[in-house]
Amino acid sequence: MRTTDIDTLLEQLREALIRDDWNSAVNLVEALRPPDQAELFSELPETLQDELLERLNPEDSADIMEELDDEDAAELAQRLDSEELVRILNKMEPDEAADLLGDIPPAQVDQALSAIEDAAEILPLLEYHDDSAGGLMTSADVILHQDLTAREALDHLRTVAPDAETVYYLFVVDDDVRLVGVVSLRELVLCLPEKRIQTVMDQDVITVPVEADQEEAARLMARYDLLAMPVVDAQNHLLGIITHDDLVEVLEVEATEDIYRLGGVTQDQPVDTGISTTLRSRVPWLVLNLGTAMISAFVLSLFSNTIAQFAILAVFFPIVAGVSGSAGTQTLTVTVRGLALGLVELRDGLKTLSREFLVGLMNGIIIGVIVALIALIWQSNPILGLVVGAATFFNLICAGVAGVLVPLGMSVLRIDPALASPVLVTTITDTFGYFFYLGIATLTLIYLL
């Protein structure tokens, strides 16, 4: 739905609420799709949200709660009385309900679980961390035993499938609920009615361990183009499944997290985040950046005599450092993304380093020649052009190497490469850029003057 449509609907909703016309307000919200319901709902003041939620049918209330951001949903849940919260939780998917319960106070959780209809499905999901495969999974509603016939399996599906989140894949278990295979609904429908499931199932099932990180689970699902993936324990017992909608959410969260960290921000910060919270997350990295910048300043101080004798050198500082910094950021972004998606492993370090060295070499030749010509034409000094071009050439090679080695080094130290790498790569390109530039200028100073 377009933003203009949302704005129009929001105005209509506000007018209905001003008139205390709750029937119109409810009809307006219930006619929308869940994402649009949540967007419209989030624009209302808290008091109106609470009143409106009580008047919506439980299915729509649950849809809105599932679509809201985790923090907003938790705040809303804490404002609801126990009876209203239970009414909504009963209509939520088990994994969504578990996520919500994990974000509210324990006393409220205990009170809600004592009254929820499907508490037995939700309780196991609360045992796992939110960022793990176990925290991401939902209950496996449709499970087939390997000894069932196709006819018996279809009869079973007619009973349970209407309430199941997904029946894309039908997972097959043995007597101990160990995962032994998977069969598609199409295969089940087309095979002979008396054929047993174990004769038509695929025994090569892609699974994810329950304790695995959610990013690993999302990576597996994306790699093999799965709509659902089973979660198992060490004994291969089927514990639940992860569905494709959870995959999309995980990829969005992980991508957002990496972007924030590449910018030196350690956590998600909406535009309305409090000033004190924002300062606490940003100032430490600015202090670190200040410390690393002092290294570049120290290198400059070593060549103060050269700068004093030929001041025009200072004009080209931004070019030598800036171009190389951009090149380093390009390499860093590619490497960090490759590490995050599993496309680059530590064992691939030498191959990746060789590739980026060659890219840096070619960049250095091309950009170095261009910069040298600019310096020559601008200052009518061929030696200055040679100095600036050579410094740019060497620093672009350095930028390519740093853009690979720094994130790989962070991974070896088990530090998130997206978090510290940008500051270090910038420091390296600035410091070496000044060193190459002023070092070469010092060696050729007699020809520059």
Image (spheres, rainbow, N blue to C red):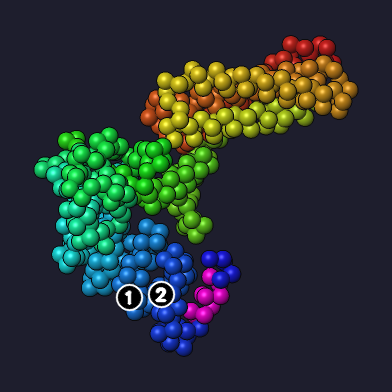
Three-letter residue code for mark 2: Glu
Q: Which residue is mark 1?
A: 57
Q: Residue at x 64, y 33 (%)?
A: 326
List the residue tagged with mark 2.
30
Q: Is residue 241 visible?
A: no
Residue 228 lies, with reference to residue 415, above or below; the image says below
- Residue 406: horizontal and vertical position, in percent? 49, 26
Residue 152 against residue 293 in the figure, above or below: below
Q: Position of residue 373 (x, y in %)?
A: 82, 23
Q: Quadrant of the C terminus?
A: top right
- Looking at the rendering, which quadrant does residue 433 occupy? top right
Name the residue at 42% across, 32% down.
342
Residue found at x 78% / y 25%: 370
Residue drawn 45% across the image and 71% down it: 32
Q: Which residues are magenta?
A: 6-14
Residue 299, percent from left and from top: 63, 22
Q: Is residue 221 magenta?
A: no
Vertical arrangement, residue 38 with respect to residue 290, above or below: below
281 horizontally vs 304: left or right: left
* In-image side of 66 versus 437 (left or right): left
Q: Are marks 1 and 2 in contact (CB under 8 Å)?
A: yes
Q: Quadrant of residue 21 in the image?
A: bottom left
SS class of the residue under badge 1?
Answer: loop
Q: Nearer the viewer, residue 103 or 296?
A: 103
Task: Give the main secondary structure, helix, strand or loop, of the magenta stretch.
Answer: helix
Numbered tag placed on residue 83 in the rendering: none
Kind of residue sitting beneath label 1: Asn
Q: Mark 2: which secondary structure?
A: helix
Height in image: 203 above or below 100?
A: above
Name which of mark 1 and mark 2 comes first in the sequence.
2
